[in-house]
Image: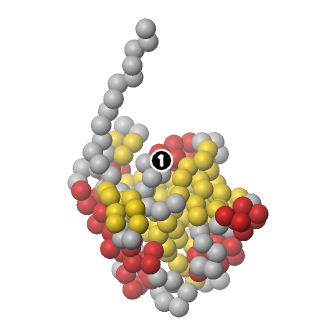
Amino acid sequence: MRVPLELRRAYKLLNHGPTTLVTSAAQGRTNVMAAAWAMPLDFEPPKVAVVIAEGTFTRELVDASGELTLCVPTRAQLEQVYAVGSESGRDEDKWARYGLKPVPASRVQAPLVEGCVGWLECRVLPEPEVQRKYDLFVVEVVAAWVEDSVWKDGGWDFPEDSLRSVHHMAGGVFFTTGERVQVQKPRKG
Protein backbone atom coordinates (compact mmCIF):
# COMPACT_ATOMS: atom_id res chain seq x y z
CA MET A 1 0.00 0.00 0.00
CA ARG A 2 1.25 3.49 -0.84
CA VAL A 3 1.88 5.45 2.36
CA PRO A 4 3.20 8.99 2.92
CA LEU A 5 6.88 9.48 3.64
CA GLU A 6 8.14 12.37 5.72
CA LEU A 7 9.46 15.02 3.30
CA ARG A 8 12.80 15.32 5.08
CA ARG A 9 13.31 11.60 4.37
CA ALA A 10 12.37 11.83 0.67
CA TYR A 11 16.03 11.62 -0.36
CA LYS A 12 16.06 7.97 0.75
CA LEU A 13 13.92 7.04 -2.23
CA LEU A 14 16.70 8.06 -4.64
CA ASN A 15 20.01 7.93 -2.78
CA HIS A 16 20.71 4.39 -4.00
CA GLY A 17 20.63 5.61 -7.63
CA PRO A 18 17.57 3.92 -9.16
CA THR A 19 16.23 4.58 -12.62
CA THR A 20 13.08 6.69 -12.31
CA LEU A 21 9.95 7.17 -14.34
CA VAL A 22 9.36 10.89 -14.89
CA THR A 23 5.76 11.88 -15.50
CA SER A 24 4.52 15.21 -16.74
CA ALA A 25 1.19 16.85 -17.55
CA ALA A 26 0.16 20.05 -19.33
CA GLN A 27 -2.37 21.22 -21.88
CA GLY A 28 -4.56 18.15 -21.31
CA ARG A 29 -1.78 15.65 -22.12
CA THR A 30 0.43 13.46 -19.97
CA ASN A 31 3.65 11.61 -20.63
CA VAL A 32 5.98 9.14 -18.97
CA MET A 33 9.68 8.63 -19.66
CA ALA A 34 12.56 6.82 -17.98
CA ALA A 35 15.45 8.79 -16.49
CA ALA A 36 18.58 7.25 -15.02
CA TRP A 37 20.00 10.62 -13.95
CA ALA A 38 18.06 11.75 -10.89
CA MET A 39 19.62 12.43 -7.50
CA PRO A 40 18.78 14.03 -4.16
CA LEU A 41 20.33 17.44 -3.47
CA ASP A 42 18.99 18.65 -0.14
CA PHE A 43 16.96 17.60 2.91
CA GLU A 44 14.81 20.57 3.99
CA PRO A 45 13.17 21.52 1.82
CA PRO A 46 13.90 18.35 -0.12
CA LYS A 47 15.37 19.00 -3.56
CA VAL A 48 16.28 16.69 -6.41
CA ALA A 49 18.20 17.15 -9.67
CA VAL A 50 16.96 15.37 -12.79
CA VAL A 51 18.14 15.55 -16.40
CA ILE A 52 15.40 16.03 -19.02
CA ALA A 53 16.76 16.49 -22.53
CA GLU A 54 15.80 19.48 -24.64
CA GLY A 55 13.44 18.63 -27.48
CA THR A 56 11.66 15.80 -25.65
CA PHE A 57 7.92 15.78 -25.13
CA THR A 58 8.46 15.45 -21.37
CA ARG A 59 10.59 18.61 -21.40
CA GLU A 60 7.84 20.47 -23.27
CA LEU A 61 5.23 19.44 -20.67
CA VAL A 62 7.51 20.18 -17.70
CA ASP A 63 8.39 23.59 -19.14
CA ALA A 64 4.67 24.34 -19.55
CA SER A 65 3.54 23.10 -16.11
CA GLY A 66 6.54 23.54 -13.84
CA GLU A 67 5.75 20.14 -12.28
CA LEU A 68 6.70 16.49 -12.56
CA THR A 69 6.75 13.27 -10.60
CA LEU A 70 9.63 10.86 -10.10
CA CYS A 71 8.48 7.28 -9.63
CA VAL A 72 10.75 4.37 -8.63
CA PRO A 73 9.86 1.38 -10.84
CA THR A 74 10.43 -2.29 -10.06
CA ARG A 75 12.09 -5.28 -11.68
CA ALA A 76 8.60 -6.44 -12.69
CA GLN A 77 8.23 -3.23 -14.75
CA LEU A 78 11.65 -3.44 -16.42
CA GLU A 79 10.50 -3.97 -20.02
CA GLN A 80 8.04 -1.08 -19.71
CA VAL A 81 10.74 1.14 -18.20
CA TYR A 82 13.11 0.48 -21.09
CA ALA A 83 10.35 0.98 -23.68
CA VAL A 84 9.12 4.34 -22.34
CA GLY A 85 12.72 5.53 -22.13
CA SER A 86 13.36 4.60 -25.75
CA GLU A 87 10.40 6.23 -27.50
CA SER A 88 8.73 9.63 -27.62
CA GLY A 89 5.21 10.18 -26.34
CA ARG A 90 4.65 13.21 -28.56
CA ASP A 91 2.68 11.24 -31.18
CA GLU A 92 1.64 8.18 -29.19
CA ASP A 93 0.18 7.43 -25.76
CA LYS A 94 2.99 5.47 -24.08
CA TRP A 95 0.77 4.81 -21.05
CA ALA A 96 -1.68 2.79 -23.15
CA ARG A 97 0.88 1.21 -25.45
CA TYR A 98 3.00 -0.19 -22.63
CA GLY A 99 0.28 -0.89 -20.08
CA LEU A 100 1.34 1.62 -17.45
CA LYS A 101 -1.46 3.04 -15.33
CA PRO A 102 -1.44 6.71 -14.27
CA VAL A 103 -2.99 7.49 -10.89
CA PRO A 104 -3.66 10.98 -9.52
CA ALA A 105 -0.97 12.66 -7.47
CA SER A 106 -1.90 14.66 -4.37
CA ARG A 107 -0.09 17.98 -4.97
CA VAL A 108 0.78 18.17 -8.69
CA GLN A 109 -1.04 17.54 -11.96
CA ALA A 110 1.50 15.02 -13.26
CA PRO A 111 0.27 11.52 -12.41
CA LEU A 112 1.99 8.81 -10.39
CA VAL A 113 2.76 5.44 -11.99
CA GLU A 114 0.86 2.58 -10.38
CA GLY A 115 2.98 -0.41 -9.40
CA CYS A 116 6.10 1.54 -8.53
CA VAL A 117 7.60 1.38 -5.02
CA GLY A 118 8.40 5.07 -4.48
CA TRP A 119 6.92 8.34 -5.67
CA LEU A 120 8.03 11.98 -5.43
CA GLU A 121 5.72 14.82 -6.43
CA CYS A 122 7.84 17.79 -7.49
CA ARG A 123 7.70 21.44 -8.50
CA VAL A 124 10.43 22.93 -10.68
CA LEU A 125 12.64 25.57 -9.10
CA PRO A 126 13.39 28.14 -11.79
CA GLU A 127 16.99 27.81 -12.95
CA PRO A 128 16.62 28.73 -16.65
CA GLU A 129 20.35 28.96 -17.38
CA VAL A 130 21.09 25.56 -15.83
CA GLN A 131 18.11 24.03 -17.63
CA ARG A 132 19.19 25.48 -20.97
CA LYS A 133 22.88 24.76 -20.64
CA TYR A 134 22.81 21.32 -18.99
CA ASP A 135 19.22 20.02 -19.38
CA LEU A 136 19.30 19.85 -15.57
CA PHE A 137 16.18 20.57 -13.55
CA VAL A 138 16.28 21.31 -9.84
CA VAL A 139 12.94 20.41 -8.28
CA GLU A 140 11.46 20.68 -4.81
CA VAL A 141 9.70 17.61 -3.47
CA VAL A 142 6.23 18.59 -2.24
CA ALA A 143 4.93 15.08 -1.45
CA ALA A 144 6.61 11.70 -1.05
CA TRP A 145 5.17 8.19 -0.94
CA VAL A 146 6.55 4.70 -0.49
CA GLU A 147 5.17 1.19 -0.90
CA ASP A 148 5.01 -0.02 2.69
CA SER A 149 5.79 -3.65 1.80
CA VAL A 150 9.34 -2.66 0.74
CA TRP A 151 10.06 -0.12 3.52
CA LYS A 152 11.46 -1.33 6.84
CA ASP A 153 12.94 0.71 9.68
CA GLY A 154 13.15 3.85 7.54
CA GLY A 155 14.75 2.31 4.45
CA TRP A 156 14.42 -0.05 1.51
CA ASP A 157 14.04 -3.77 2.19
CA PHE A 158 12.88 -5.80 -0.79
CA PRO A 159 11.06 -9.01 0.25
CA GLU A 160 10.96 -10.37 -3.30
CA ASP A 161 13.04 -9.88 -6.44
CA SER A 162 10.16 -8.57 -8.58
CA LEU A 163 9.85 -5.52 -6.28
CA ARG A 164 13.53 -4.49 -6.38
CA SER A 165 14.34 -1.12 -7.93
CA VAL A 166 16.33 -1.05 -11.17
CA HIS A 167 19.47 0.77 -12.28
CA HIS A 168 20.16 1.42 -15.97
CA MET A 169 23.79 1.12 -17.05
CA ALA A 170 23.51 1.66 -20.85
CA GLY A 171 22.10 0.03 -23.96
CA GLY A 172 19.35 -1.88 -22.19
CA VAL A 173 21.61 -3.31 -19.47
CA PHE A 174 20.15 -2.98 -15.97
CA PHE A 175 21.03 -4.10 -12.47
CA THR A 176 18.56 -4.58 -9.64
CA THR A 177 19.03 -3.37 -6.09
CA GLY A 178 20.71 -6.00 -3.93
CA GLU A 179 20.08 -7.27 -0.45
CA ARG A 180 19.91 -5.00 2.57
CA VAL A 181 23.00 -5.26 4.77
CA GLN A 182 23.28 -3.50 8.14
CA VAL A 183 26.69 -2.39 9.41
CA GLN A 184 27.22 -1.22 12.99
CA LYS A 185 28.79 2.16 13.67
CA PRO A 186 32.40 1.87 14.78
CA ARG A 187 33.01 2.52 18.44
CA LYS A 188 35.04 5.55 19.33
CA GLY A 189 38.08 4.93 21.00
- Report the residue that reaches farthest toward the bottom: 91
Q: Where is residue 47 in the image (x, y as percent from the top left)?
A: 62, 50
x, y percent for residue 161: 24, 56
| Residue topped by disc 1 | 15
Q: Residue at x 59, y 80 (%)?
A: 57
Q: How many labels does the image show?
A: 1
Query: How many neighbours does mark 1 have within 10 angstroms: few (below 14), some (14-19), or many (20 or more)?
Result: few
125 and 34: which one is in front?
34
Viewer-nearest residue: 101 or 167? 167
Q: The N terminus is located in which quarter? A: bottom left
Is 49 situated above or below 179? below
Q: In which quarter of the image is residue 181?
A: top left
Q: Where residue 50 sits: x, y (%)? A: 58, 60
Q: Check the image and name the residue furthest to the front.
A: 171
Task: Judge whether residue 13 can be spotted in this image.
Answer: no
Helix, strand or loop under label 1? loop
**Residue at the image point whose x is 29% and y is 48% from the top:** 178
**Who's the residue at 24% across and 50% down the image?**
159
Q: Which amino acid does label 1 sit on?
A: Asn
Specify the quadrant that holds the C terminus.
top left
**Residue 54 visible here:** yes
Say if 183 sits above or below 180 in the image. above
- Residue 48: x and y in percent read 59, 53
Against 81, residue 94 (above or below) is below
Determine whether, in the image, residue 134 is placed left or right of residue 114: right
Q: Which of 188 and 95 is in front in this view?
A: 188
